Structures are given as structure tokens and as C-alpha cells.
Image (cartoon, rainbow, N blue to C red):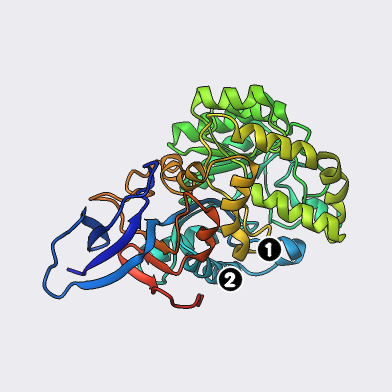
Amino acid sequence: MAESVVVCGTLFDGVSAELAGHTEILVRDGLIAEMGPAVSRPEGAEVIDLSDRTVSPGFIDTHVHLTMDAGALARQTLDSTATKALSGLSLAREYLGHGFTTLRDLGCMDPEFPTVDLRNAIDLGLVVGPRLVVAAHILSPSGGHGDLSGFYPSRWDLPVSTVGDSLGEIRRLVRREHAHGSDWVKTVNAGGYFSVGDDPARVSWLDEELGALCETAAQLGLPVAVHTGAADACRQAIRAGVRSLEHAYLIDEEGVEMAARAGVFIVPTMQMTQEDLAMLQAGTLPQQAVWKFTRDNQQILQSQRIIAGSEVKVAYGTDCGMFPFSHGILEFQAMVNAGLTPLRAMRAATSVAAELLAREDLGVLRPGAAADLVGMPGNPLADISVTSQVDFVMARGAVFRGRGAPLTP
């Protein structure tokens, strides 16, 4: 049995409103075996001294794209499936070094299933990386946010989009995701900012179409995440039975209240807005995004404040892949700047994210939970920026990044 004892100076357990003082954690075979002021010290167990660090559950990012590169999206979609999987592995390992021990990947632009293969390889121990939860593709109506045909000349027919329009096609696409190993279904019911020919302020699925998608997914036991923007689109998605609203760019008070009553999670990807604002000001925002984001950016910020001021369940998600993974850790600060408390931001990346994923073994520190731990200097409940200084990472009981060691992907 692989055993170690982690000695923590202070501890955030993923739930509590205050940090615990000196705590020891006995790790055995990838799980937390004991936890308290003092624990057993089995012979041969490694003692890891984090007595000058705050220890937290490993962070969970519930919205990433390991196989997408927004800076060169049209070109990158033409890479081979193997190239996407290998580059995704490199990004996943880098992100693990920042403390993200679990990722939900919400769609590749590839005809195959590279993120499913990557998840399976990590689970089997063939490669080292964060735990992955996967929605393999982005199911979209033609002309919707997941339809990349607008990036290419009309004479080209490239199999990088997963598009359906009739109810039968929509149900078939959901069943295909299930058959090939997706954990989630990802869809879009409003346009996006970086895509061509669609508008975030417009609803893209008809009610019956999104209803058919969600009904089929529910029958197969797959939760649904929806990229959404317009307030009408947010309400449509909640009525259809999705589990999470991604971005919810233009949601209003009514939509937030509906989500809270229905138990629907919102993943507001607030750092992405800051990245877009910086590109808009620098004149580097892609041309197809400029008019849409110029029109909407103030409303997006207002919608984020509405979310922050509500009781809705907010989960941590970044949309990394649409901007550099090295910036994903800044989502904590973006959340707090929008009005969430540091405690709520920390829960969003731990216990609430785990609840979204229906994983009781993640996002908390308690006996029986996964031994996913991160260490950082300072108190994140007093200064959320210390989350960007993680320098110890344990994933599934194995030390990936040692205390004080530099980040090495």
C-alpha cells in the first residue's frame, strides 16, 4: 500500500466557512484514510511537510477545451486526431501543475473522440494527467455556435462540426456520444462571439429540438451542458432540463431565479470576458467577434454581477482553450471582482464543482474522498489571489508537484 502523511498548516475542506488549523491527512492508495489534528504514522509512510501552507481540495475546472486553440481555430481543426490528443495531454499536465486535478472538457472539433481516448489513457495509468470528465463533441444546429462551416469556403465539406436539424438527427447525435463514451452531452442554444455567422443574442434551437436532445440524453443517463447567451436562451435551456448553463452571457434576474429554483448550475467563465476585453482594447479580437462583443460587453458584466448577487449554484469554469490555460487560475480573481465572496469562489472550484459533476469523492477533504490536494501560501478566504501561487499538487494520492518546486509541464 502506498501511504503518506500530509502535515497542513491550515486547511480549507471545500465546504467550511473558515480555515481549520493544524491538520494531518493520512493518504492510502489514492484516498484520504484519516484526517485530524494527528493521524497514524504507518511504518515507511512519507511525511510531507506543508505546515506553512494552506491545503485545499484539488481545483476543478468544469469548462475547458484541451483540443482547441482559439488563436488558430480554423487551422487547428485540420490537425490529426492524434496531434490534438497529444497537445491536449501537454496542456492537461501543465494545468495540473497549477492545481487543477479534475477537468470537464466540453467538446473538441474533430470527427473522432480524442478527449475520450485521453481520459481513458489517464484512467488506465498509461499517461499522467488530471482526471477528465468529457463531452466529446459540441452538438449544434446548422449555422449555430458549434457549426464551423463559416470558417471555410462553402465548397469545402469538412467533418469537424457535429450538426443536426431534424429531431431524428438530433437524437442520433446524442446516442452517438453515448455509444462512444461521453460522460456528458454538450450543446449550444445561442450564438457565440468567436464563431462566424451566429449571434449570442439569438436563440438557435427550437424548443422541441432542444427538448428532444435533453430527453434523449436523460434517457441515456447523460447530463447536458449548454453554451448559452441570450436571456431567452437561458430560460429555454432551464425549461428543457439541462444541468448547467455555460457562460450565460446575457442572463437576466428572471433566468437566474429560474436556475436557482430548478437547481441548475451556472458556469459563468468570467475570466474569458476579461481576456476578450483586453483583446478588444488591444485591437486583436477576431473580426467576427468585434461587433458582437462591442455591443454586449457591458451587459455581460452586468449579468455576471446578477449571478454573483444571487443564490444560484456557481461552478468554476474558464473556457481555457479559447484563451491560454496558464490564465485559467485567474478565474478565482475574476469571480471575486464580479462580486462573489472568496469563500464562494473557493467552493465553486471544489465542492460545488464536484456536486455539478455528481462526484461525492471530489472537491472535499474528508476520509474516503480522493486524495487530490493543493498547497498554497496564505489564506485564500482572505486573499483569493494566493490561489495563483499553488506550489504543491497531489493527484489521486501521488505527488505531481512538490512543495516549492517550479512548474514543469
Question: Which of the two labelled residues, at mark 1 and mark 2, occupies the earlier sequence position?
Answer: 1
Considering the numbered disc 2 on the image, is that residue within a helix, a strand or a loop? helix
> Crowding near pointer 2: few (<14 within 10 Å), some, many (20+)?
few
Position in image of residue 295 (x %, y %): 86, 40
The quarter holding residue 327 reads bottom right
For the image, the number of numbered tags is 2
Q: Is residue 241 left or right of residue 145?
A: left
Of residues 201 and 393, which is closer to you in this image? 393
Position in image of residue 335 (x %, y %): 60, 46
The label on residue 339 is none
Going 41% across and 40% down the picture, which residue do you hit?
355
Position in image of residue 65 (x %, y %): 60, 57
Residue 240 visible from this viewpoint:
no
**Whether residue 379 is situated above or below residue 342 in the rendered picture:** below
Label 1 with label 2: CB-CB less than 8 Å: yes
Of residues 205 and 180, which is closer to you in this image? 205
Position in image of residue 397 (x %, y %): 30, 64
- Measured in 3D between alpha carbons, the distance from the residue under mark 1 to the one under mark 2, in whole angstroms, is 10 Å
Q: What amino acid is at disc 2?
A: Ser
Residue with the mark numbered 1: 69
> Crowding near pointer 1: few (<14 within 10 Å), some, many (20+)?
some
Considering the numbered disc 1 on the image, is that residue within a helix, a strand or a loop? loop
Residue with the mark numbered 2: 87
Of residues 51 and 150, which is closer to you in this image? 51
Going 76% across and 38% down the picture, which residue do you hit?
200
Q: What amino acid is at disc 1?
A: Asp
Looking at this view, name the residue that lies furthest to the left. Answer: 43
